[in-house]
Amino acid sequence: MYNYPMAEILITHSYFLRFDPKQWKAQNPYPPLATLYAAAVLKQKSFDVSFHDVMFDRSTNEITDSLKKNKPKLFVICDDGFNYLTKMCLTNMREAAFEMIKIAKKFGCTVIVSSSDSTDHSEEYFNTGADFIIVGEAEQTLLELTNHLLKNEKNLAEIDGLKYSENKNQISTKHRENIKDLDLLPFPAWDLADINEYKKRWIKSSGYFSLNMTTTRGCPYKCNWCAKPIYGNRYNSRSPENVIEEIKFLKEKYHFDHIWFCDDIFGLKPGWINKFSELVSENNLQMNFKIQCRADLLLEEENIKALARSGCDEVWIGAESGSQKILDAMEKGITTEQIHEATNLLKKNNINPCFFLQFGYKDETGSDIDATMKMLFELMPHNIGISVSYPLPGTKFYETVKAGMNGKTNWKDSDELAMMFHSSYPKGFYKKLQRHIHKKFRRKQIEEVFKLLLNGQSFKPEYVKKLIRYPFYFLTSMPSAE
């Protein structure tokens, strides 16, 4: 499958789509963006870089062929910190990383790892054979470390954002400051990825092709369950002009139909969304895209109207709960009223609102769950994602519940939905709740479509999009003939 030239550096990531059954079934894969950024920075400095994409590999053994062909000096596992699936630190992917480290060490490689999981579990990675772990943003630390290892240009202790083992002691260097001017970064090394393979799978599964981009790094908000080991609690943004240039490049090169802007928060910087909308119009860019954003931010500066003008057709809101008590406990900084107002305004502007919902937060009661369900079925967003509270190291929530944790610290895949701490309801309750809500939600969606048909009304654009994008849900949610 791979035909790479010899390289000093072989870079990969540890997200195997096959090892995450729910995502493998969906077949909506995105290239590992952070990995391609790191590769681009190395290429910009004239290092020989090869990329092995494990996204569609059947097993970790497939990395062996790339190691044989390239004979690299450095083997880099750089996970995609922009992808929420990677941020969950799934144990299937951790085990895959461990296996690839062992294989690379057999080829005599120096192994470098950059990921949320290696930051949280560095001891395990060192015990497996990793030589270096990058803490925080990967690009500059990886570049300096590469210079040190291949050109001996800098002492290890002078490289910020690094962990390594010395005389069986773990050494941590000074924290590295985040890159503030993101426009200085090259575009991701898209040419290293097999974009046609991604496109083929999107077209087959969904009928259109979506690519991922990022316009920002980090998040300044204080949600106490949200871990930020890579980009931290700061927020840095690319300029709208820089983003538009990449869109134009991707449109011409790969002919995408749709973009997922995978920022934690899209357009937080004042005036950014309006300027972006102006540039989309000026450059006559015809596209649709989806974003993640906060309910309160959407209500500022006529952001929703600007999003609609620029082609946004889907906004994912971290609604989390319909209980203000739970939102306050999470330190979300939003109100249920803002969720209602933003949802209705998105619909008014023909943008599909979607909700992330979270159950099982500490001290959540049946009344809190009822409030979330009431909000959901009153507002009826376009789509939902349901999870349970997930304690990750480094968060205030983790410290709050760790005494009641059952020894399990990560899910094996993204659909496990296991509670990892003592909660209000018994084991298995939340997975049943998730399945129940999804089934009821999809049934109500299809009932809305049938009502339109029975009343002789034509379909609204949002219903057409639902039928095109989510046919599986409609087929499985249809009322029975009984």
Image (cartoon, rainbow, N blue to C red):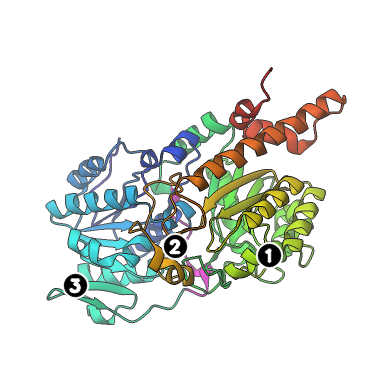
Q: Secondary structure at mark 1?
A: helix
Q: Position of residue 22 (x, y in %)?
A: 46, 39
Rendered image quadrant of residue 333: bottom right
Which segment did they paint magenta? 179-190
Q: Earlier in the sequence, mark 1 or mark 3?
A: 3
Q: Earlier in the sequence, mark 2 or mark 1?
A: 1
In this rendered view, identify the residue nearer to me: 186 or 389.
389
Q: Which residue is mark 2?
A: 391
Q: Residue at x 33, y 78 (%)?
A: 160
| Quadrant occupied by the C terminus | top right
Closer to the observer: label 1 or label 3? 1
Image vertical order of residue 212 relative to residue 120, above or below: above
Closer to the observer: label 2 or label 3? 2
Q: Position of residue 23 (x, y in %)?
A: 46, 40
Q: Earlier in the sequence, mark 2 or mark 3?
A: 3
Q: Position of residue 68 (x, y in %)?
A: 17, 44
Q: Which residue is mark 3?
A: 165
Q: CA distance from mark 2 to mark 1?
A: 21 Å
Q: Position of residue 130 (x, y in %)?
A: 21, 62
Residue type marked 3: Ser
